Image (spheres, rainbow, N blue to C red):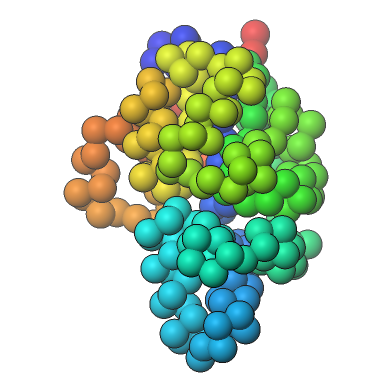
Amino acid sequence: MKKFEHIDTWVFDLDNTLYDASTGVFDRISDQMTAYVSDLLKLPEQEASALRRHYWKTYGTTLFGLMKEHKVDPHHFLHHAHDVKIDDVAPCGIIKAGLEDLKGRKVVFTNSSRAFAERMTKHLGIRDHFEDIFSIEDGNFLPKPQEEPYLAVLRNFNIKPEKSAMFDDMEVNLKTAAGLGMTTVWIHGDDKTPETHALEHLHHKTEKLADFLREHLPRKE
């Protein structure tokens, strides 16, 4: 379609984007994070869960909040948080075929660890479609939506923002991308909030990545 003809680089979030939220994988990761907070601070599970969400909303990730507030070793946290089962996640044929046919460079930009991103994309059968992965470690643990890791992605992969598109399930992450000149695609899942859907920095919207790849994107000739 004409509105994507100028795009030569596609930037994809991982969690709840390259795999659906309905798989429950990120819920498992969240549970692992809650358990970590509970063990670290000797809090009941309910309090630990509330604190985890507070750090996520305040700092962008639970990890960054724990680093700021409690000097947590990020590598130890990431290993624990991503020690989850993924073998029951069925690879999506539409996503795999769509990525294969999609013209231009493709990279993963995630707040997850490199080890988990590598493991998940290989399990999904899509790792070979990506030039590289930019993980939370690559951004010195600064998470989206902070601007610094976006600038690092653009610089590291020599991406021109005005010729790139970014897919993410979190609208706040796409606000930073849009501010830098990237075209944005919001993977909104079951979020039907009218106020959110009306936000100007959400240029395109779809419930699932598979829907968008099947219906909207230009293919290789």
Q: Which residue is drawn at 61% across and 43% down?
A: 140
- Image quadrant holding the N terminus, namely top left
Q: Where is residue 73 in the image (x, y as percent from the top left)?
A: 67, 63
Numbered marks: total: 0
- Location of residue 90 in the rendering, given as x and y in whole percent from the top left corner: 71, 55
In depth, the one of 39 and 186 nearer the eye is 39
Q: Residue at position x 43%, y 14% from top?
A: 162
> Residue 153: horizontal and vertical position, in percent?
58, 28
Q: Is residue 124 visible?
A: no
Residue 180 vertical placement versus 187 (above, below): above
Task: Work out whether residue 63 or residue 191 is closer to the camera in this orientation and state it.
Answer: 63
Q: Quadrant of the C terminus?
A: top right
Q: Where is residue 220 in the image (x, y as percent from the top left)?
A: 64, 13
The quadrant in which residue 80 appears is: bottom right
Q: In this view, does 51 lie to the left or right of 149?
A: left
Residue drawn at x 41%, y 11% as measured from the top left: 2
Occupied quadrant, residue 130: top right
| Residue 87 appearing in the image | yes
Q: Quadrant of residue 198?
A: top left
Q: Nearer the viewer, residue 215 or 21?
A: 21
* In the depicted structure, whether residue 89 falls above or below residue 206: below
Q: Residue at x 26, y 48 (%)?
A: 196
Q: In this view, does 19 lie above or below 138?
A: below
